[in-house]
Image (cartoon, grey):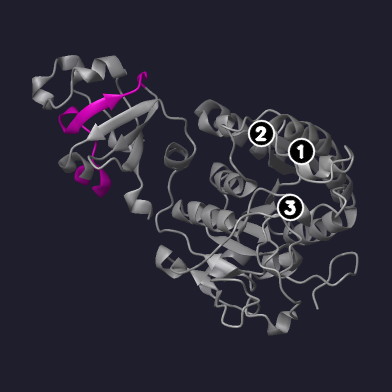
Amino acid sequence: MTTRPSGLPLSPYRNHDDDVEFPGPAVPPEQSPAFGHESEMRSHIAQAKRVVVKIGSSSLTNDDFTVDPNKINHIVDALQARMVNSDIIVVSSGAVAAGMGPLGLTQRPTDLATKQAAAAVGQVHLAHQWGRSFARYHRTIGQVLLTASDAGRRDRARNAQRTIDRLRQLRAIPIVNENDTVATSEMRFGDNDRLSAIVAHLTSADALVLLSDVDGLYDRNPAEPDARFISEVRTGKDLKGVVAGDGGLVGTGGMASKVSAARLASRGGVPVLLTSADNIGPALEDASVGTVFHPREGRLSAWKFWALYSADTGGTLRLDEGAVKAVTAGGTSLLAVGITAVEGEFHAGEIVDIIGPDGQVVGRGEVAYDSEQLTGMLGKHTDELPEGQRRPVVHADYLSNYASRL
């Protein structure tokens, strides 16, 4: 039977983590459908040179909302074993949860100010325990706190990327978390699952490992006798009929959040392994457990991924049907003739949403003109424009569409 570091039995379906919606009896690994899988993609994940590992709140804290050093030691032991051949970047939840105990809070706060106060306290305790545990292997950690607005600004995103890369070069372990002490409710990643997908692309990782309380993805509550385990997700069709819920007592994520983050990373070209934190050993050793999300062929460049999924947008361009077909086909620049309307005030060089006549966002791109200038160019062919306005509105190199990533 799988055990926690404390020696207590732990079911892969109990609500210990921040992302479990499937309570149920403990199941020995040899009887679980989530164990013993082999595939070419699993071999790729097992051999990946740079891996982002995301750990949820309750995998790091006790029932009294204090940081559990035994849990962290268990995780660090597995990370250290993998670091013989790979670089590891940790995305760690748990700041708010870790601050609740010291502040005497018995349930996760709902107001922003108390959440931020708990995070301010918890970040100190959490970083201390990560540092103490890695010190057993003579390793140093570095804490990297990010907000959605940091990821949304290209200059800040580059700075975060450089910081993480430099920490790795100095043989320190980056511990990344959302900066809950300053993030507003309107400018949040929403959960660290999405953050981990963004970090995986920001750092050009070769694989992402998402650790939850469930040993893999099921189409429903695995306690039900007819629940089906899903070992491989190659396209969205493999998720048809899957029911996934929200987070637990101390976290904001859930299985739905995990699946969303896994698809986000895989659409950009990063393979994902989803399993339980208790299974971190085999997950990092040979990837024989859990559910694998296959990446799309043709990895997005860091810029295109950032533009599609992280960047702040300054406005909107509405296109006619012909322009939508040209843009979604790929490799074609957006010209003024296909634009029917400009919304918002923006400057040249900003990222804008590109929307079809039905209102659906089809892509994003870096616009070459200010909104005021562009308004006078709408619907005109290139030869009808003055010399200084004959450049594409969005060049193909700076345009990315969602259709190619579905």
The residue lying toward the viewer, choosing from 293 and 114, is 114
Say which amino acid is labelled 2: Thr
Q: Helix, strand, or loop for circle 2?
A: helix
User: Is residue 290 visible in the rendered structure shown here?
Assistant: yes
Q: Helix, strand, or loop for circle 3?
A: loop
Question: Does the CB distance between marks 1 and 2 fall below 8 Å?
Answer: yes
Q: Quadrant of the C terminus?
A: bottom left
Q: Which residue is mark 1?
A: 142
Residue at 56% across / 82% down in the picture?
A: 226
Say which amino acid is labelled 3: Leu
Closer to the chain start, of discs 1 and 2, is 1
Q: Nearer the viewer, mark 1 or mark 3?
A: 3
Residue 405 rendering spot, x and y as whole percentages = 38, 53
User: Is residue 206 visible in the rendered structure shown here?
Assistant: no
Asked whether, in this view, residue 249 is left or right of residue 99, the answer is: left
Q: From this viewpoint, which residue is outermost toward the left?
A: 384
Say which amino acid is labelled 1: Gly
Closer to the chain start, of discs 1 and 3, is 1
When asked about the image quadrant of residue 127, the answer is top right
Residue 163's disc number: 2
> What's the CA distance linking mark 1 and mark 2?
9 Å
Q: Which residue is mark 3?
A: 249
- Compared with 221, 335 (above or below) is above
Q: Quadrant of the N terminus?
A: bottom right
